[in-house]
Image: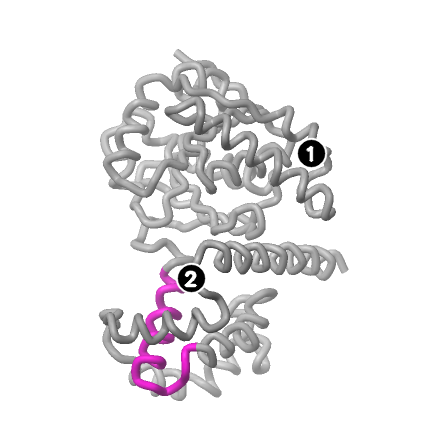
Amino acid sequence: MASSEPGDVLILGSGLIGRSWAMLFASGGFKVKLYDIEQQQVTNALETIRKEMKILEQSGSLRGSLSSEEQLSLISGCSNIQAAVEGAGHIQECVPENLELKKKIFAQLDQIVDDKVVLSSSTSCLLPSKLFAGLAHVKQCLVVHPVNPPYYVPLVELVPHPETAPATMDRTYALMQKIGQSPVRIMKEIEGFALNRLQYAIIGEAWRLVEEEIVSPSDLDLVMSDGLGMRYAFIGPLETMHLNAEGMLNYCDRYREGMKRVLKTFGPIPDFSRATTEKVHQAMCVNVPDDPEHLGARRQWRDECLLRLAKLKRQMQSQ
């Protein structure tokens, strides 16, 4: 049976999310093993991480107090799952979003881990009750859902299985804080967790407004980027309500009826028809053509914006 040392982390899957997790844990001083089924995938991932860390260090954006070389020395690759599990206190699964594949991985882990290691999945939408059904170590299992791109966006949703032990949640919450992430506790599982439920609510209404020709796609995005998004970068919708009146009670007294009146006019769930999809696609491609080069450059610009915003947020919070 594998031993469990608290300082070791195992990442299963070496794609974008797996690499980001490896970098985050290394930034917090943790020894990290990066596992994938093929050694070449691991080798490629380690090289990508090295390049990314060097660029981050050169721009003064590397997280943590250790140098890039010190952080890189903490990350090693592995293509043997038995050897990978040895010494792990926290296991973060990052394989593709396929329920059967993930269940197979966790069933395999269930056979070889001890009763101390935390088993967590990075899934963005699969429910813990489906992922961890029937596992002997279910009390040690939970979803730890990061936001893409995880290195630049600190939020992490912790979602328990109905049988997850409170100690598992507490331990993982503390671990996420230690590596500089912002964990939130989802008290019980629900489709979409919290982040995607809010995101899909916005997408749904955005789609309706564009489909009904209330506003153009580019202006719709401007409503968020130069309006709501600027508020929400620092405070959430509930605190926004609290500050936009003389406290929450006053806000609801003032705006309750207006909110209900507007909410009643919301249409059904959009079917995301091909016609509207093509209309929105064309509008998006005016500024960002959908070829890999333009999309990659825009993502890089987005990540730079997120880095600068994160720095500003830290400065503001320390004042």
The kind of secondary structure element at disc 1 is: helix
Within-10-Å neighbours for mark 2: few <14, some 14–19, many 20+: some
Question: Magenta stretch containing residue 292, yes or no?
Answer: no
Residue 67 spot, x, y in % from top left: 73, 33
- First along the sequence among labels 2 and 1: 1
Q: CA distance from mark 2 to mark 1?
A: 33 Å
Up/down of 33 relative to 245, above or below: above
In the image as oriented, which residue stretches furthest toward the right? 319
- Quadrant into which the C terminus falls: bottom right
Q: Nearer the viewer, residue 219 or 99?
A: 219
Magenta region, mostly helix, strand or loop? helix
Residue 307 spot, x, y in % from top left: 64, 54
- Quadrant into which the N terminus falls: top left
Specify the color scheme.
Answer: one colour
The residue where tag 1 is placed is 68
Left-right relation of 255 to 164: right
Left-right relation of 169 to 52: left
The residue where tag 2 is placed is 290
Question: Magenta stretch containing residue 210, yes or no?
Answer: yes
The kind of secondary structure element at disc 2 is: loop
- Quadrant in the rendering for residue 215: bottom left
Residue 212 spot, x, y in % from top left: 30, 84
Left-right relation of 298 to 70: left
Q: Are marks 2 and 1 in contact (CB under 8 Å)?
A: no
